[in-house]
Amino acid sequence: MRLPENRSFCIIIVVLVIPFLNFNGIQDPAFDFTKLSGPYLGQDPPGMEPELFAPGIISDGNSSGSSVFSKNADMFIFRKSGNYAKEIFITRTNSGRWSQPVTVQWDSKFLESDFTISPDGRTIYFASRRPATGKTKPSSEASLWKSELAGDKWSEPEMLGGHVNTQYHESYPSAANDGTLYFFSRRPGVIGKSDIFISRNVNGKHIDAANIGEIINTLHDEWDPYIAPDESYLIFCSTKPGGLGNDDLFISFRSAEGSWTEPVHMGNKINSAGWDNRPNVTLDGKYFFFTSDKTGTREIYWVSAEIIQEFKPDYIR
């Protein structure tokens, strides 16, 4: 339907829609989280078969995105869409029970998304279209930002510098123990449509990002890289032929010589005919989390991280 070319009509639409969206938080998740106690929201841990994480609580039919637990698994941060207008929520344990989730204080209307947590649990890296430092208008493409944990609060986000960000789309940053950052970008010069890049941390500062190379990147889309803290393996998504669906999860291991092994498809336990992405391993190394829309709605799944060893080549075991 074409809208009438009438400015007053358009103004009315804006006035009506913006209050309805209420970007500061439509509602908290409906489930009473204070009923939950114990590690990982009190959920029974999975085995070698992926399971929905917290069905009816986190995986509740409202599209889910990134999710991370803190180092001691006493804080959980997750992103919801659907009725939640793409908000990032946080819940913590309090006297043994989990608190009702509230939006992270810096969550905004600028589409914060695709976040991971550093191996020490002190930094969240995320993508956002919020205005660049010194500017007032939101960016047309996502850039990479970080927020530091100070006490029980997260600091005001800081945009990563030009050694990492460009004017083009960057997203899903993942950090190794030494601060090396892996992420994907759609900047000029990529091998495919989007490629995975790496920016080393030297003396506390990131140096110019470099393309990780053709072993990982193809003529198609590669995105959502998760790097193991010791950089021993890399899990990422790809739309290259040979997968089961729209994008699939692959894994590559670092050889003794420092090169990456040929990526291995993570099989139909993990992948589906739909979208399978946002890989993440809990900071205690116990569980592998990812999202999938295999049931028709994007939900969060978890499985024992021991499944990763099933894909490791014999010659580097």
Image: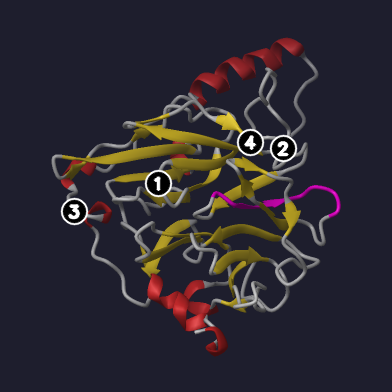
Q: Earlier in the sequence, mark 4 or mark 2?
A: 2
Q: Which residue is mark 3?
A: 38
Q: Earlier in the sequence, mark 3 or mark 4?
A: 3
Front in this rendered view, residue 273 or 71: 71
Foreground tag (4 vs 2)? 4
Image quadrant where residue 217 sits: bottom right
Distance in Å between CA atoms under marks 3 and 4: 35 Å
Distance in Å between CA atoms under marks 2 and 3: 39 Å
Q: Earlier in the sequence, mark 3 or mark 1?
A: 3
* 90 lies above or below 46: above
Q: Which residue is mark 2?
A: 141
Distance in Å between CA atoms under marks 4 and 2: 14 Å
Front in this rendered view, residue 65 or 11: 65
Front in this rendered view, residue 12 or 314: 314
Q: Residues within 10 Å of mark 3 (few under 14, many from 20)?
A: some
Q: Which residue is mark 1?
A: 121
Q: Earlier in the sequence, mark 4 or mark 1?
A: 1
Q: Is residue 248 left or right of residue 215?
A: left
Q: Which residue is mark 4?
A: 160
Front in this rendered view, residue 225 or 295: 225
Q: Which residues are magenta?
A: 179-189
Badge 1 element: loop
Q: Is residue 274 left or right of residue 7?
A: left
Type of the residue with mark 3: Gly
Foreground tag (3 vs 1)? 1
Q: Position of residue 61 (x, y in %)?
A: 41, 52
Type of the residue with mark 1: Gly
Residue beneath the point at 52% across and 81% down: 311
Residue beneath the point at 52% across and 28% down: 108
Image quadrant where residue 29 sits: top left
Q: Earlier in the sequence, mark 2 or mark 3?
A: 3
